[in-house]
Amino acid sequence: MKSIIAVFLAIVYLGSIAPLQAEAEESVQKEGIAELNQIMVADEAFEAKELPDDNSASVITYQSGQSVFVTGETADGWYKVSYQDKEGYVRKSLLFIQEFDVEGLDKEFQELEMESKILVEEVERYRTEARRSRIWGIVIVLLVAGIFVTGIISTKRMEREKTR
């Protein structure tokens, strides 16, 4: 009985998800915007427009070299961009994808990782030396105290022997 209920709930759950996916696909197709979701860089200073039209009102201003979050791409040569709660459209020619030197980044990451390992080893060595130093300090204090106590005891014994 429990397995039948579990199967029924799974079917109901899957049935409720399917319409949501279909609605999302329909909204993208209605607007004619392909989803991108990537960060690009402004080639020059420009203003994002309210609609994909040069005569449309400006909604966002970008400076040259500023990062721009691109959420989509239209078929007629515009990117849909987003900044905080504002959305706008920018001509494709105004943005470029920033290329990353993957090999250089990997090398830099490996060097940083090696430096981190060396730092960790150095800190561990320092802590070990500090612990060892404390132990030796305690041993020396105990030896000095033992010598002092032995001196006092031997002095007392000598005084007793003299008085006898």
Image: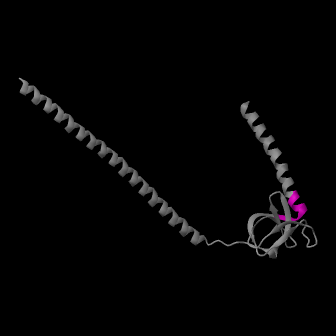
Most foreground residue, 2 or 154: 154
State the residue at coordinates (74%, 36%): 6
**Residue 49, image x and y in percent?**
88, 68
Most foreground residue, 121 or 155: 155
When asked about the image quadrant of residue 151, the answer is top left
Magenta span has 31?
Answer: yes
Left or right, 51 with reference to 162 = right
Task: Name the quadrant of the N terminus.
Answer: top right
**Residue 100, image x and y in percent?**
64, 71
Left or right, 67 with reference to 164 = right
Farthest right residue in view: 55
Above or below 145: residue 19: below
State the residue at coordinates (14%, 32%): 155
Left or right, 121 with reference to 105 = left
Above or below 109: residue 148: above
Most foreground residue, 113 or 138: 138
Magenta span has 47?
Answer: no
When asked about the image quadrant of residue 3, the answer is top right
Q: How many numbered discs, if any?
A: 0
**Residue 163, image x and y in percent?**
7, 24
Residue range in magenta is 26-34
Task: Name the quadrant of the C terminus.
Answer: top left
**Residue 122, image x and y in percent?**
42, 57
Farthest top residue in view: 164
Q: Tell me, what colour scheme is on the image?
A: one colour
Of helix, strand and loop, which mostly describes the magenta segment?
A: helix
State the residue at coordinates (20%, 34%): 149
